[in-house]
Image (spheres, rainbow, N blue to C red):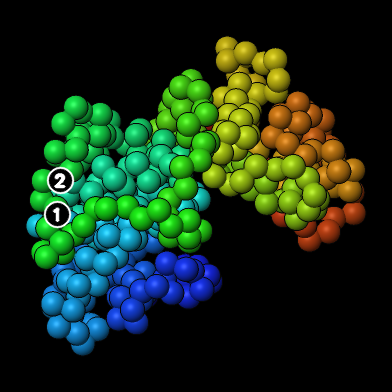
Amino acid sequence: MGYNRIQDNFWIDEKVKNWDFKTRMIALYLLSNQHSISEGLYHLPLSYMAEDMCLKKEEILEGVNKLSAENFIKYDKDNSIILIINALKYQPLNNINHYKSALNKLEALPTSPLLQDFIEQAELYNPKFYSYLKAESKKKRFLKKGFSTRKSKGLTADRNKGLQTNSLDGLSTNKSNSQAPALSPTLTQTQAQIKTESGKKEEAEFLEQINSDDNFKKAAELASYLIELIAANNPRAAVPKKDPADRLFLKWTKEMEKLHRLGPVGAKAKENKGYSFAEIEAIICFSQQDQFWKNNILSAKKLRKQVIKLENKLKSSKFNAPSQKNNLLKELYLAAKEEENSNEEK
């Protein structure tokens, strides 16, 4: 069973209050039915709605007409696809797992011209997700077509193909001038519009590395681990979101990858001073347990800069009176050294 968010001002919105009761119920159904997904683009034959709501198909068509005219939804009759126009504005996707899940759902849908409208909504309201989709379009044919169609000169004609445009048949595309905050798109400057092309390219490349490179994937996991521990020790510390599309998280992950591949700041690849991921994990854990270091290691860059001191302190801690946590740290460190020695023997 899934959960979809419904804005708490739905019932007091002026546009909603002007709808008749049946139209309001159909709108609520479209936001919360078992076929819907939080991204807002999903497959829904009108016969399903009629069956679930115990209404006649003509009544459903009338409600779809009204909601289409009010710019609340778009409906592709030929492919039975619903688009909730503002879904990504009020239910944004926040991490790579959400992005992957949404991509799988989109790929399973019948081909629909509403995909281009969905991509526009992503660019307008969820630019990080949009960057992910753009990167994935290099590998996914259905997305590639969605992006290329969006740029073509015949975009309007292509989008209308397969859509109901006769109000008697179910889809009107006239837009309302209502300023209702929960339903009408707001044409404001967004992050997607002010990002530089180089920034978008960097994010897209990083997302591809997260998906395809095991070292970057592990580095991202360790960056997330450090973020969690720092936030627990220092709630007011400036840490990035655990989100691969976050620019600061990208920097933290790169520092972890460099610590593994190169070693401390200034080390060269040929010097073989890199740390295993098990060693890095042990050092992170120690840095956030030690009374002194947990107040000083507040970023991945600082961890890499101080890693030699932290490693030495971790080694010397085995001569101190052991606590349960210190025992665990020693075990992690010894396991890392065994792994390192094993690799050298090979």
Label 2–label 1 contact, CB within 8 A: yes
Q: Is residue 238 at least partly visible in the picture? A: yes
The N terminus appears in which quarter of the rendering?
bottom left
Residue 160 place in picture, x, y as percent = 15, 45
- Left or right: where does residue 279 sit relative to residue 21? right
Q: Nearer the viewer, residue 256 or 230?
A: 230
**Residue labelled with disc 2:** 160
Q: Residue at x 36, y 69 (%)?
A: 31
Nearer-N-terminus badge (2/1)? 2
> Residue at point 32% right, 42% down?
119
The residues tagged by marks 2 and 1 sit, at their Cα atoms, a distance apart of 8 Å
Residue 53 placement (x, y as % from top left):
24, 83
Where is residue 41 drawn, in percent x and y? 29, 56
Residue 192 in the image: state x and y as whole percent. Answer: 48, 34
Residue picked out by circle 1: 165
In the picture as drawn, the residue positioned furthest to the bottom comes out as 54
Observer-side mark, 2 or 1, equals 1
Describe the element under mark 2 as helix, strand or loop. helix
Instruction: Name which residue type carries label 1.
Output: Thr
- Residue 1 higher or lower than 112, as above or below: below
Q: Residue at x 58, y 15 (%)?
A: 269
Q: Residue at x 14, y 39 (%)?
A: 158
Q: Which labelled disc corresponds to residue 256?
A: none
Q: What amino acid type is highlighted by mark number 2?
A: Asn
Task: From the viewer's perspective, tell me whether residue 131 is left or right of residue 269.
Answer: left
